[in-house]
Each structure stands twice: as C-alpha cells, then as structure tokens.
Image: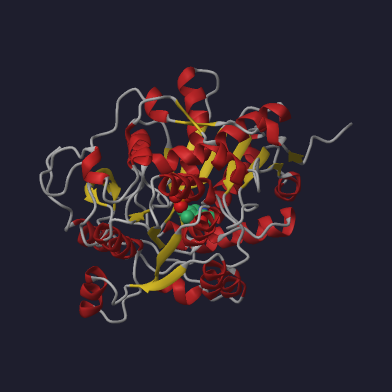
C-alpha cells in the first residue's frame, strides 16, 4: 500500500493569478461603513487621506475576482505557492481516523501569512506616489511583513508596536529594523492619541486599538504618508484568499474534500483567506464543509462580543464598522497570542457569522499551547501562538472522529511559525502560563462605551 503524500506542492506556474472577492457571492451585502461625524456611508474621498485609490476600490468592489498585478506575483514567488501538508504523524499520535491537512504560511519572509497583503499594499501605495507607510503591530508579525514589503518597493515604514508585545518579543524589533523599518512602542509620546493614554496610565500595556490611533494620526497629517492595516478590512481579506485558492488546488491533487475547516481569528484575515474560497464552493453547492473560527477566551469578539457599529481604533478616528466587538476601549489580558488581541472582528467575517455560514468557538491559552507542543513533537514545526488556537480545535475535532469512527477531512491554516515566540513556549513548559477568560462584568464594562448608532 502506498502512503498518501505528506507534502502537496504546486509549481510556480500553478499559482493562482487572482484574488477572490466573497462580496460577489453573499446572499446579502454587509452593512455600510459609516463616517464617524455624519453617520452617513463613507465615500472614496473620506478614505483618500489614508489609502491609495486602488485599495479603496478593492474595499468596495463587487467583482468576483481581482487580478494580482505582475509586480506582486513576482514578490509572491519568493515563497509562494506555500505547501499543504498532510499531518500523518499528528493523526497517528492521536489515533484518529480523521485526515488532517495544514496549509503552512510560515515559509514567508515574515514567518506568517501577513506578507500576502503587505506586498500588494506596498505595491499600490508606491504606484500612487506615496513615500512612507505607517502602521500598528501586535505580536510584530504585521510590522515585519510591512517592513519587508516596503523595502521591496522603496517605501519608508514607521510602526507602532503594542507595548506588551514590544517588551515580550524583542527580536521582532530587530527584524523590522533589519528590513529598514522604524519602530516605536505604543502608547508613545509621539502622537496626541498616545499622549492621552499615557496621561491616564503611564504603564499602559497598549492595545492594537491604541497603536492604530497613533499610526492613523501620523498618516492623516502628512500627504506623502499613508496608513496600512494588516487585517479586518475587505481588501486585506481579499489579498489573503490566495491561501484558500492554493489549498483548493492542493486538496484536489490529494483527492480530498474538506468536511471541517478551522482557523484562528484575530481580525479574521488568515481565516478568511483560507475559508472564503471554500465558502464560495459551499454557496455554489459543490462541497459543504463546516467552517469554524477559533478565538482566544480572553478576547472573544465572535462568541461573546456584540454585533454593533464600533470604531476600529481606541481614539475613535476610524470610520464606524458594523462588527462583532468587545468595544474599542477594550484592553485584553496580555496573552501570548498577540495577534489575536483585537477588540473587533472583520466586518465581512462578522456578517457571514450573522448569516450562519460559519461557526465560532473560544479556547483558553494553556489548551492551545498544549496543542502547539503536541504539533511540534509530531509534525516538527513550532507554531506561532495564534494558530495553536486552530490546532487545539483541530485536535478536538480529530478526537471526536476517534470516538465516532468518522474519517473526516480537516483543513487548517498554520498561519505562522513560533520561532520568535519561544519565550511564550518557555513560560508554558515551565508551568508559568495562566488561563484568562473574559468575565461577564468585564464584558459589560467593555461594551458600555460603544458609540450610539441606530441600525
Ligand atoms: C496577525 C496574525 C494573526 C491574527 O490576524 P488575522 O487577521 O486574524 O489572521 C494570526 N496568526 C498570525 C501568525 C498572525 O501573524
């Protein structure tokens, strides 16, 4: 008997040349994004101080497919197509009849899926004559990706990193500076938004919402400077769909169709990137996978947050988006999955969740690290803390299959490696990690400051 393949690869010529836009296929459109002052739907002019027109168009386009520019494909070829692995060794260790596949994005220059959107964002900004990009970063993955992408297209890159992560992950700063970026801990005294937070709490651990306020403030003040966001927005999710488009081709090569797709969700971009092309197939009736988002119990925007209009940042400078949110003032516990510590969920993910097209579960961090260690010992890759959430849900599903005897096909996104997160593994291995779960009181306090918008 020949064993099924372990690594399913695509050649460069098989790499998809277009991104998939799920807006074209949704049964109903997501609610409009609103101007924070007028509460009217935002138009392209409202966004022009921050983003180039090509990205603003991608934010609202109804076209099913968007061609990937040649210049972007050229950079993608440094690591794409990324491999799809069959987790034979994990399956055997679990004794499950399930077939587990993981799409590995840790092969990128930043070690995660983030360059899939950083590269086109830098490209479109450079093409529009922009000189500098500002952004926030949590765990440092997005900052690394944007610094790398900026260097590819001759842009300067200035980054505000959430203080808690800045202190936990010093090597991200070195990586960002090696790629030519500039990095500040957030909150910083360089912006009005940062100074306001520091005045209230000089020891603030920061949050993605605060760091976004700082980066947006600087971009809004300089005509030659734009802002880039690493998740949440429609165009970011669009760029990430190359993950799922490749995985569709690779699973077909393996002769399998997914029954369950799981992915971790911070702002939702790697999850959407993997899941949306499969959701297209589900909506078209060619397959019917269960699609499950996995979030941290300490920052459970889908499973415990409210579906309401909220700001994307803490200072309230961004447009209002209808999304599952814990409130823009929410500061999550400093869990090690820094990339999952965001108060809101992508409007598109929130919308498909409301439509009942996807499910969501929350996991505490020790169960996740246990899954990460189990994965490392069997498959040989140390996962970033974020995708350990997806792995915990994969293992849970595979163990259910063991009980029922169902040979389900499970697909997940291993969206990054954890080589710069070893301090977190060290804390876990020495028993020093705590579980945090958001209490009902903390949740009630967090959503109390939501902006009042009807609808
Ligand atoms: C940024 C990041 C995340 C969270 O962001 P999403 O937009 O939800 O994908 C998850 N995993 C890794 C490795 C990240 O870098």
- The relative height of residue 146 versus residue 291 in the rendered view (above or below) is below
Residue, x 48% and y 18% (percent of image)? 284
Q: Is residue 42 above or below residue 287?
A: below
342, 122: nearer the viewer: 122
22 vs 35, left or right, is right
In the picture as drawn, the residue positioned furthest to the top comes out as 285
Q: Position of residue 394 (x, y in %)?
A: 58, 45
* The C terminus: image quadrant: top left
Q: Position of residue 123 (x, y in %)?
A: 47, 46
The reply, left or right, for residue 146 in relation to residue 317 is right
298 vs 150, nearest the viewer: 150
> Would residue 45 appear left or right of 296 to someone viewing this image?
left
Question: How far across and how far down the image is residue 393, in percent?
Answer: 54, 47
The residue lying toward the viewer, choosing from 40 and 168, is: 40
Is residue 69 depicted above or below 35 in this figure? above
Residue 396 lies, with reference to residue 109, above or below; the image says: above
Q: Residue at x 25, y 39 (%)?
A: 44
Residue at image coords 16%, 49%: 36
Whether residue 440 can be seen here: yes
The answer to whether any part of residue 307 appears in the image is: no
């Amino acid at each position: 008997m020949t064993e099924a393949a372990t690594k399913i690869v695509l050649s460069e010529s098989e790499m998809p040349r277009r991104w998939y836009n799920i807006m074209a296929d949704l049964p109903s459109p997501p609610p409009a994004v609103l101007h924070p002052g007028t509460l009217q739907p935002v138009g392209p002019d409202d966004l022009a101080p921050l983003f180039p027109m090509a990205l603003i168009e991608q934010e609202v386009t109804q076209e099913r497919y968007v061609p990937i520019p040649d210049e972007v494909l050229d950079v993608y070829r440094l690591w794409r197509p990324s491999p799809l692995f069959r987790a034979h060794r994990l399956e055997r260790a679990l004794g499950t009849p399930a077939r587990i596949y993981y799409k590995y994005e840790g092969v990128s220059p930043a070690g995660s899926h983030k360059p899939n959107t950083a590269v086109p964002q830098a490209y479109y900004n450079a093409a529009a004559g922009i000189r500098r990009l500002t952004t926030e970063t949590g765990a440092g993955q997005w900052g690394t990706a944007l610094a790398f992408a900026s260097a590819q297209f001759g842009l300067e890159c200035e980054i505000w990193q959430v203080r808690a992560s800045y202190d936990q992950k010093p090597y991200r700063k070195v990586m960002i500076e090696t790629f030519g970026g500039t990095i500040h801990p957030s909150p910083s005294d360089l912006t009005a938004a940062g100074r306001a937070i520091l005045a209230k709490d000089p020891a603030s651990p920061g949050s993605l919402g605060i760091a976004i306020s700082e980066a947006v403030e600087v971009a809004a003040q300089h005509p030659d400077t734009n802002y880039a966001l690493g998740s949440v927005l429609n165009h970011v999710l669009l760029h990430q769909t190359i993950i799922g488009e490749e995985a569709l081709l690779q699973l077909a090569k393996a002769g399998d169709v997914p029954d369950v797709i799981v992915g971790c969700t911070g702002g939702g971009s790697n999850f959407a990137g993997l899941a949306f092309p499969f959701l297209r197939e589900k909506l078209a009736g060619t397959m019917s996978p269960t699609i499950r988002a996995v979030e941290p119990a300490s920052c459970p925007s889908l499973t415990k947050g409210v579906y309401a209009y909220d700001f994307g940042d803490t200072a309230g400078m961004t447009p209002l988006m209808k999304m599952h949110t814990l409130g823009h003032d929410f500061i999550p516990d400093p869990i090690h999955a820094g990339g999952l510590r965001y108060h809101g969920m992508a409007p598109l993910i929130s919308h498909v969740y409301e439509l009942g097209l996807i499910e969501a579960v929350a996991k505490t961090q020790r169960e996740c690290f246990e899954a990460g260690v189990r994965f490392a010992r069997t498959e040989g890759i140390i996962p970033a803390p974020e995708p350990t959430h997806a792995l915990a849900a994969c293992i849970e599903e595979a163990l259910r299959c063991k009980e029922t005897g169902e040979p389900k096909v499970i697909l997940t996104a291993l969206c990054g490696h954890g080589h710069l997160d070893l301090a977190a593994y060290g804390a876990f291995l020495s028993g020093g990690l705590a579980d945090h779960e958001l209490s009902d009181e903390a949740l009630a306090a967090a959503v109390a400051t939501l902006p009042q918008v009807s609808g």
